[in-house]
Image (cartoon, rainbow, N blue to C red):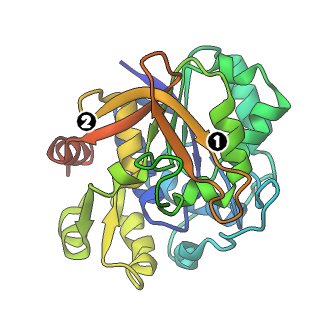
């Protein structure tokens, strides 16, 4: 089965976005119809997307989106991995702030067919849903890497997940939308899937992972491993046996200044949100390295 996928990403900060893009480009079940970028320096992020797509020989629409959150101050201002762009051929002819219009047109041209995979702060997606309220119902499904769902109101607080708290008001808008199917893979699940730097160097042999390894050199200046947050969410588009999901509802904190973006999960059989509750790490890596086999 082939899935039409629209990817919204903050590639250029955490390296797992680049890993996710490489996976989608190599995944035989993926018809990647476009990539949009979000948060600080979205044009530089689009250039990173184009560098990886160029290695894949893939002519895919790439559109920069919102550089700033809806209301709160920007906490993710830079795309640090853009420092490696000089070593890779990439496009520079991007139309600024074109992401939302592109997303809207693509979804309206293929109602009920598109999986929107959002792996960064949700500013672009929230703007899309606000500008055209019919769009959520025209999706096939919405798949998110974001939030953490191992906490309850009234309990000692855990910090909010990064994608959810960078633009908490956008997160709230997106979780309030009525979509046909909505899956979230949260931080408490994705952090179970990781590789140490030495393992990454040894196992990332596919040509599509060459630019990813180069971009990762910036990442490994302050990290010792790659956690496969975003690629795990992507794998769940194509495989139902990697993560187990529970059904319920999600509330997003937007009032308590110390808890902005915290996602509260309530399990309910008749809920409208599916949240990952378990992951098979071995099955995930078997899938990843079979797709990106040398």
Q: Position of residue 157 (x, y in %)?
A: 50, 60
**Count of numbered marks:** 2
Does 60 appear above or below 183? below
Horizontal placement of 4 versus 20: left or right?
Answer: right
Residue 242 marker: 2
Judging by the rendered image, the residue that carries numbered circle 1 is: 61
Q: Nearer the viewer, residue 292 or 260?
A: 260
Q: Position of residue 279 (x, y in %)?
A: 25, 42
Q: Nearer the viewer, residue 106 or 94?
A: 106
Residue 30 marker: none
Horizontal placement of 275 versus 36: left or right?
Answer: left
Q: Position of residue 32 (x, y in %)?
A: 51, 35
Q: Residue at x 65, y 66 (%)?
A: 258
Q: Residue at x 36, y 37 (%)?
A: 276
For the residue labelled by badge 2, is the local secondary structure a helix, a strand or a loop?
Answer: loop
Q: Position of residue 120 (x, y in %)?
A: 58, 53
Q: Residue at x 69, y 72 (%)?
A: 77
Does 151 appear above or below 132? below
Does 121 appear above or below 279? below
Horizontal placement of 197 versus 135: left or right?
Answer: left
Q: Nearer the viewer, residue 47 or 127?
A: 127
Q: CA distance from mark 2 to mark 1?
A: 29 Å
Question: N-terminal of the two: label 2 or label 1?
Answer: 1
Choose top left, top right, bottom left or bottom right for residue 222: bottom left
For the residue labelled by badge 1, is the local secondary structure a helix, a strand or a loop?
Answer: loop
């Amino acid at each position: 089965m082939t899935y039409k996928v629209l990817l919204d990403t903050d590639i250029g900060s955490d390296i797992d976005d680049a890993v996710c893009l490489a996976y989608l480009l190599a995944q035989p079940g993926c018809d990647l119809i476009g990539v949009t970028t979000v948060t600080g320096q979205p044009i530089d992020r689009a250039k990173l997307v184009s560098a990886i797509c160029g290695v894949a020989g893939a002519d895919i629409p790439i559109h920069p989106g919102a550089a700033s959150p809806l209301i709160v101050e920007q906490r993710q201002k830079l795309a640090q991995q853009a420092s490696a762009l000089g070593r890779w051929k990439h496009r520079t002819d991007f139309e600024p702030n074109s992401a939302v219009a592109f997303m809207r047109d693509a979804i309206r041209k293929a109602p009920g067919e598109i999986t929107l995979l959002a792996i960064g702060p949700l500013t672009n997606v929230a703007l899309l849903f606000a500008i055209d309220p019919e769009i959520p119902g025209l999706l096939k499904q919405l798949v998110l890497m974001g939030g953490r769902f191992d906490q309850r109101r009234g309990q000692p607080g855990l910090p909010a997940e990064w994608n959810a708290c960078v633009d908490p008001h956008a997160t709230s808008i997106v979780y309030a939308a009525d979509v046909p199917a909505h899956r979230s893979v949260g931080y408490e699940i994705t952090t179970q899937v990781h590789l140490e730097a030495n393992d990454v160097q040894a196992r990332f042999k596919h040509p599509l992972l060459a630019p990813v390894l180069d971009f990762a050199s910036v990442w490994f200046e302050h990290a010792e491993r790659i956690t496969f947050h975003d690629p795990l969410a992507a794998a769940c588009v194509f495989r139902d046996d990697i993560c187990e999901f529970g059904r319920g509802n999600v509330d997003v904190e937007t009032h308590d200044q110390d808890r902005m973006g915290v996602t509260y999960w309530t399990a309910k059989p008749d809920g409208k949100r599916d949240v990952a509750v378990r992951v098979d790490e071995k099955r995930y890596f078997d899938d990843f390295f079979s797709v990106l086999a040398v």
